[in-house]
Amino acid sequence: MRPILILLSMILLNTLVKAQKITFHKDIAPIIHNNCTPCHRPGEAAPFSLISYDDVAKRANFIKKVVSSGYMPPWKPDNDYRTFHNDRSLSKAEKDLIIKWVDNKAPEGSAKAEIQTSAKAYVNGTQYGRKPDTVLKMSKPFPLKGDNSERFIVFKIPFDFDKEQNVEAIEFVSSNKQVIHHANFAIHPVEDNIDIKQGADFVDLSGADRTQYDQYLPFKTKMDYYGGWIPGTSLESYPKDFGWVMPKRGVILLTIHYAPSGKDQEDISGINFFFTPNPIKRKVSVISLGSAGVGEGSIEPYFMIPADTTKSFELKIVTPQDQSVLYVWPHMHLLGKKFKSYAVTPEQDTIPLVSIPDWDFKWQEIYRYKKLVKIPKGSILTIEAFYDNTKSNPNNPSNPPRMVFSANDMKTTDEMMTMLLVFLKYEPGDEDLELDPK
Ligand code: HEC
């Protein structure tokens, strides 16, 4: 009896599922457009577009595979520890829907049925909902030789506006994201008596000779803001009345780490700026904690990972004032395995900030909170990181493993234990303020 019952119920279920008729336009497109298209479209990091029915249908089996295994969409934080506004992981129901649709031979359905609510209209050249007000980018394409070597280049991008500008969002952009390992940029205001056009357009720091860099030192007396990009990272935007002020005149120093490439290529990179005429009531700041930042010398034990060992480190920093945190951005390199950060208040309450139990250098992100997170004055902000410098770490760039330190030149073969924190001074009511960046 039993097998027959099972068979019958399977047939019944099958008919039910068929009756529901999962179609691309009605059911699948909204999921793809929200969770895949931000990266899978022209100009972004993924190797092919996932926009139209054809884009998706011709890769249906492949999509089923990467969605079932959890490889796509990439999302590394532990959602049970802390959830984020920009969570792009799929729910079980969404995954099941995609899998069933593929199993049913990926029917297209009527385009009229497409639900437009969730699928954002993407603007070319940006992940923000509108065109940038200014794009500050390299003056000419950078030629990348196809000689399979990695390169570290610092580009000088001078700017001279007629006035200061209030920034509501910034975004790294590139004509060739697929050749970029990572990028970071610092915005330096420069006094009128210093020529911002002086010096080379870029300096190459790939080799041992770093003296070329000295020509940029006159620009570096002050820094107003900094940010970065790694495949997977989206833009940085702030809620209404929040932001920072872009100086009238200065220089952006943009450091790009180019991945090795087997063929000659070109790249033009820069930064999109989105300004607002509204006054900025709450000034956002960014701080880098750990390697190459605040508290570097307080990492315990001393930040060094001997060959053939695994090692944990901890950094504790006292919060000097009541602060509200918007975003965190954890950063390690290839030996990194686990990353966790939390704050313990003077009352011994623990505030979870972020946990990445299975670190992957390839997928890094600015994690944006749903609401501002208050960290009271006197709290101890803690970062814990775990590294594997043995042969059994498949990402270990050295074979045999070698002793690894943190060196400030960001080579991927060195290590870092860093967290960027985007925050502002706390004001009463912040805990309830929803962060809803576009
Ligand atoms: C954060 C950006 C990002 C998002 C979001 C994203 N992808 Fe990808 N995807 C990539 C990049 C980059 C690659 C190529 C590198 C790689 O395969 O690791 C890729 C590769 C793929 C591949 C090829 C995998 C392989 O082994 O070659 C498939 C299939 C895919 N993505 C499907 C999806 C689907 C389906 C979604 C949404 C459910 C999605 N992706 C969301 C960035 C993204």
Image (tube, rainbow, N blue to C red):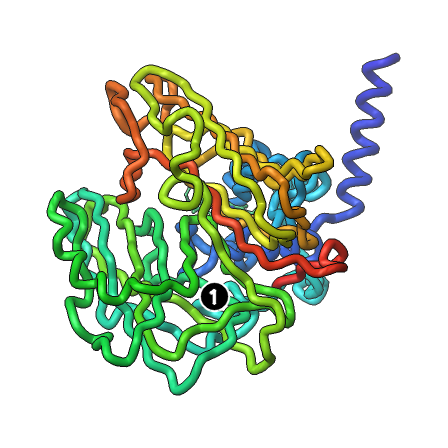
Residue 108 image point, x, y percent: 63, 55
Examine the image and state in which quarter residue 301 appears.
top left
Examine the image and state in which quarter residue 2 appears.
top right
Q: Is residue 20 visible?
A: yes
Q: Which residue sits at x=54%, y=48%?
A: 328
- Against 211, residue 353 (above or below) is above
Q: Which residue sits at x=18%, y=50%?
A: 205
Q: Is residue 79 visible?
A: no
Q: Which residue sits at x=73%, y=36%?
A: 347
The amino acid type of the residue labelled 1 equals Ile
Q: Which element type, helix, strand or loop, lies under badge 1?
A: strand
277 horizontally vs 154: left or right: right
Is 372 or 124 nearer to us in this picture? Answer: 372
Q: Which residue sits at x=29%, y=18%?
A: 307
- The residue to which callout 1 is attached is 170
Seen from this angle, which residue lies furthest bottom?
A: 162
Residue 352 image point, x, y percent: 65, 38
185 horizontally vs 235: left or right: left
Seen from this angle, which residue lies furthest top?
A: 1
242 horizontally vs 198: left or right: right
Residue 104 image point, x, y percent: 66, 41
Quadrant of the drawing holding the C terminus:
bottom right
- Against 344, residue 180 (above or below) is below
Q: 10 Å neighbourhood of mark 1: few (<14), some, or many (≥20)?
A: many
